Image (cartoon, grey):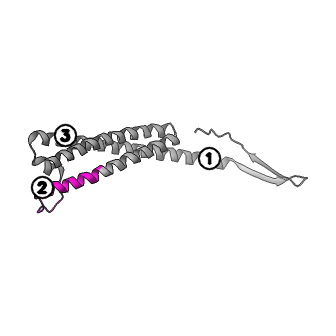
Amino acid sequence: MDTVHNIENILRRELQLYEQVCDLEERKGEAIISRDGTLLEALSHEQESVLNEILKLESRRSELIEAYRKEKKLDDLSREITLRDIINSLNEDLGNRIFQLGVDLKVLLYKIQALAQTNEKLARDHIEVFTLLLKEIKGRLSLRTGYNKEAVENCSIDNPLVINRTA
């Protein structure tokens, strides 16, 4: 039973960490919209750190599931043990708690996936807009060079544009 409680604790911690990931993904969307690359980079690094923590928990959970397999002598199962297999072998209260954690995690993962897809689309749209703007700017600018009577190079830009650095 101690193994199952450890699995439950890991699921609770994973839920907390995935809530952080969700919050960071929402903030990344805001950074993309406001075109704040520095903030976006910082949030991405923070998110990577949280995801590495989750990866360690996933590894530990896999170890505990393997320990559960041995405790319950389920070596003859030809497939991987699922959370549902564990829940079915527990008392109702503990089984319901773990089931609810699994449901909450799944819902949160779908939300994170949707946010990540939205952020990816936002980023692609911004890149496309900037690419079009740069193409337009390149088409309007031309550089003339030459030398004057004193053999000094002259350089001028036809059709100069003022570029907004925050755009």
Q: Which type of secondary structure does the marked residue at label 1 adopt? A: helix
Between 35 and 85, which is closer to the camera in this rendering? 85
Which of the marked residues, 2 or 3, is nearer the chain's N terminus? 2
Identified at 26% across, 43% down, the residue is: 105
Q: Which type of secondary structure does the marked residue at label 2 adopt? A: helix
**Secondary structure character of the magenta stretch overall:** helix
Amino acid type for the residue under numbered disc 2: Glu
Q: Magenta stretch: residue 63 in it? A: yes
Image side of residue 136 versus residue 62, left or right: right
Can you give x and y, in whole percent of width and height, for residue 30 in the image? 45, 36
Between 49 and 119, which is closer to the camera in this rendering? 49
Do the CB atoms of the residues marked 1 and 2 lie less than 8 Å apart? Answer: no
Cα separation, mark 1 vs mark 3, equals 54 Å
Which-is-in-front pick, marks 1 and 2? Answer: 2
Which-is-in-front pick, marks 1 and 3? Answer: 3
Q: Quadrant of residue 107?
A: top left
Between 51 and 102, which is closer to the camera in this rendering? 51
Amino acid type for the residue under numbered disc 1: Glu
Residue at mark 3 = 100
Identified at 74% across, 51% down, the residue is: 143
Residue at mark 1 = 136
